[in-house]
Amino acid sequence: MKKAILILTLMFFSAVGAFAQLENPVSWSYKATKISKTEAIVYLKATIEDDWHIYSQNIKPGGPNKTVFTFTPSKDFSLVGKPKEPKPITKFEKSFKMDVLYFENEVIFQQKVKLNKGTTVVKGQVEFMVCNDKQCLPPSEVTFSIPVK
């Protein structure tokens, strides 16, 4: 019995240690700016560590996972179009055998919203994949909550 407890304890601490070593080379920040009484722009900024990159929203099938924004529906606002992004870097990646579109260092995505109420909170999630020249990490999902005042 003591051996089983010891083995389980060792497995637990090994798993905790493995999770502590997971890399997280992308951090996200958010803000919103009203452009009129009834419209605002939500900014979603990814800050990317050196030698890493995230992919555009416009990746063709068969390649890496593209960046995807999902906004939680609300009666307080509606989306105007799709999220916009700056011009990405285009490069042929051997591992995917295709040209891919990606961003390094930092990228700011923008989503215009029509306000049905003076103040609101835009909520949702972003799913993205991050790679460097040696490896790709599994896709990550981050939730956000952006006040619009």
Image (spheres, rainbow, N blue to C red):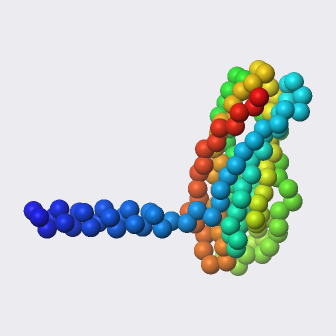
**Count of labels in the image:** 0
Percent of width and height locating residue 64: 67, 64
The residue that appears at 69% across and 46% down in the rendered structure is 69
Residues 89 and 16: in front is 16
Looking at the image, the residue that sits furthest to the left is 1
For the residue pair 114 and 34, the one nearer the viewer reads as: 34
Q: Is residue 7 left or right of residue 81?
A: left
Examine the rendering and report whether any part of residue 103 can be seen: yes
On the rendered structure, is 17 left or right of 82? left
The image shows residue 54, relative to residue 68, as above or below, that is below
Identify the residue shown where x is 55% and y is 66%: 23
> Could you say where residue 12 lies in the image, as x and y percent from the top left?
30, 62
- The reply, left or right, for residue 137 in relation to residue 149 is left
Q: Nearer the viewer, residue 76 or 70?
A: 76
On the question of residue 58 being in view, the answer is no
Percent position of residue 59, x then y: 75, 60
Tell me where residue 146 sits by quadrant.
top right
Q: Quadrant of the N terminus?
A: bottom left
Q: Is residue 92 above or below residue 28?
A: below
Q: Quadrant of the C terminus?
A: top right
Residue in the image at 75% along x and 31% along y: 148
